[in-house]
Amino acid sequence: MRRILLTALMAGVASSALAADLPTHKAPPSPAPYYTPPAFTWTGFYVGVNGGWGFSGTENNSFGHLNGGLAGGTVGYNYQIGQFVLGYEGDVDWSGVRSSNFAYTIPGGVGNDKLSTNWMVTERARLGYAVDRTLFFVTGGYAGIDTHGSFTDSFGNFGSQNVFHSGGVVGAGVEYAFTNNISVKGEYLYAPTFSKTYFAGTPDVTSTSLGISMFRVGLNYKF
């Protein structure tokens, strides 16, 4: 009996030693999870700054030709459906679009008219087509332009008046997103407005509409 127990004990020790010498088979480590960045979308609110150049003629050349710089701020919202982008954009710009003195003839004398635009506002719908991070768009809506006119003539008459012009605005442009949040755009806008009368009740009374063309660039931040 003791011989049987001794033989079994020796066999167990040998099996343990043999098992210790065999190579181990551990499972390979799990690969690190792959992070897929979210697809870019134009959807979201944004704010920005813009600047550019504007110019306009006046009816019967009453104030000559206006031109000058523009600078202001922008707010808007885009919603992307497939490759189409619907949006709203509004902006307020300081305006340096103005005319130099223009000599004109009145009965018995001559005078000078000047016209400057103080600021302008637009509220527009936008319809765009996105090619990844590039957005081609058309836009249209309302435009309002605050102006200041002044006159002097050879009879010693002089005066000035602020007049607000309302009208429409249409345009087109392209915008490119450098990151998921920052984009830059270039656009052309044309803002025709209704005719207004200046200097009523004086010999220098005149009327004009404005049709301001604007070339602008802008930088936007999307939230």
Image: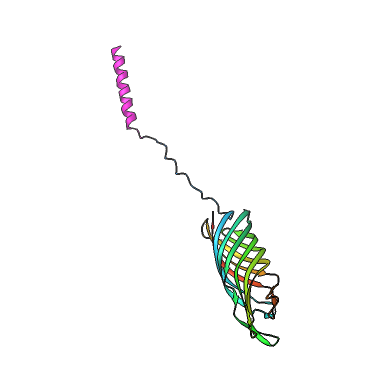
Bounds of the magenta segment: 1-23
Task: Give the number of marks.
Answer: 0
Q: Is residue 172 magenta?
A: no
User: Is 42 located above or below residue 200 in the figure?
Assistant: above
Name the main secondary structure of what is drawn in magenta: helix
Q: Which residue occupies the foreground of this view, 58 or 34?
A: 58
From the viewer's side, name the closer residue of 69 and 28: 69
Residue found 49% across the figure and 47% down from its top? 35
Residue 103 visible in the current orientation: no
Give the percent coordinates (x, y) of residue 142. Answer: 67, 63
Q: Is residue 95 left or right of residue 165?
A: left
Q: Residue at x 59, y 58 (%)?
A: 76
Please, which residue is most extreme toward the top here?
1
Taking depth in this image into account, of 46 and 173 the one nearest to the observer is 46
Of residues 115 and 96, the one nearer the viewer is 115
* Occupied quadrant, residue 194: bottom right
- Residue 14 in the image, given as x and y percentages of width and height: 31, 25
